[in-house]
Amino acid sequence: MKFTDIFIHRPVMAASLSVLLLLLGLNAMKDLQVRQYPEMTNTVITVSTPYPGADAELVEGFITQPLEQALSQVDNLDFMTSASQLGTSKITLNMLLNTNPEEALANVLSQINSVSNQLPKEAYNPSVTSSTGSTTSIMYISFFSGELNSSQIADYLERVVNPQLSTVNGVSNIQMMGGAPFALRIWPDPEKLGQYDLSTSDLVGVLQQNNYQSAVGQFNSYFTVLNSTIDSQVDTVEG
């Protein structure tokens, strides 16, 4: 007797099994996820280290290589890429699929701390950013104005637009491209610096020492308290 003969001679059992399979299929349909791609966790960690004034070779030898040697020991590391440019080092770590983002970030920070004493004192502390999901931008938004210049637009986006976009559900990272940071730009005269026997580093040091805001205290009365500050920020070339 063939297997199919069983259902031919027992039609009631065949109908019962068909109804059972139908019910199981309908029940599974409620919990079945419909998505374009499989659910996976793709974690990418970026380590950026500024080293002002250093050329690409110095950045490679004193910043990138020590950090690469330490970061190569991170668990669940898939592959790592690096770029050494004038004044900055950037290392990108691509973790294995479904790696826990919090654990990966903690391992990266631990490895950076293990070699932090080997980095030059003039270099800034490494900044670490982590992104989970697709590394390709899914939306580009352009901004323009007939009244504001590029610096004012960039300042408005940084203060107003970016915080609102960051609160949108599903937004992982926002990167602002183009524009110019809001700042006072100074072009020194090399001849005058030479006349006073000054270097550009001396000029930068003087500007940093005289460009700050400081609190001087409070003025107290019976009903009011007034906080006072000194605005010593440089906002003009003459000031």
Image (cartoon, rainbow, N blue to C red):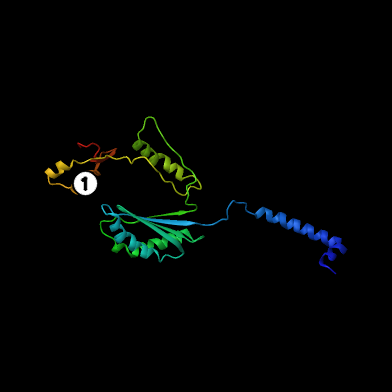
> With respect to residue 239, does 25 lie above or below?
below
Q: Secondary structure at mark 1?
A: helix
Q: Is residue 89 left or right of residue 80?
A: left
Quarter of the view holding residue 40 = bottom right
Specify the farthest residue to the top.
146
Q: Mark 1 — residue?
A: 204
Q: Position of residue 43 (x, y in %)?
A: 47, 57
Q: Quadrant of the C terminus?
A: top left
Q: Quadrant of the N terminus?
A: bottom right
> With respect to residue 70, does 144 lie above or below?
above
Q: Position of residue 153 (x, y in %)?
A: 37, 36
Specify the farthest residue to the right.
9
Q: Position of residue 168 (x, y in %)?
A: 49, 44
Q: Position of residue 37 (x, y in %)?
A: 57, 53
Residue located at (35% from left, 34% from top): 149
The number of discs equals 1
> With respect to residue 6, does 135 lie above or below?
above
Specify the farthest residue to the front.
57
Front residue of this view, candidates 50 and 194: 194
Crowding around mark 1 (Cα neighbors within 10 Å: few <14, some 14 to 19, many 20+) is few
Quarter of the view holding residue 148 = top left
Residue located at (29% from left, 64% from top): 118
Front residue of this view, candidates 163 and 75: 75
Q: Is residue 108 left or right of residue 15?
A: left
Given the image, on which type of amino acid does mark 1 rest?
Val
Residue located at (38% from left, 57% from top): 82
Quarter of the view holding residue 116 = bottom left
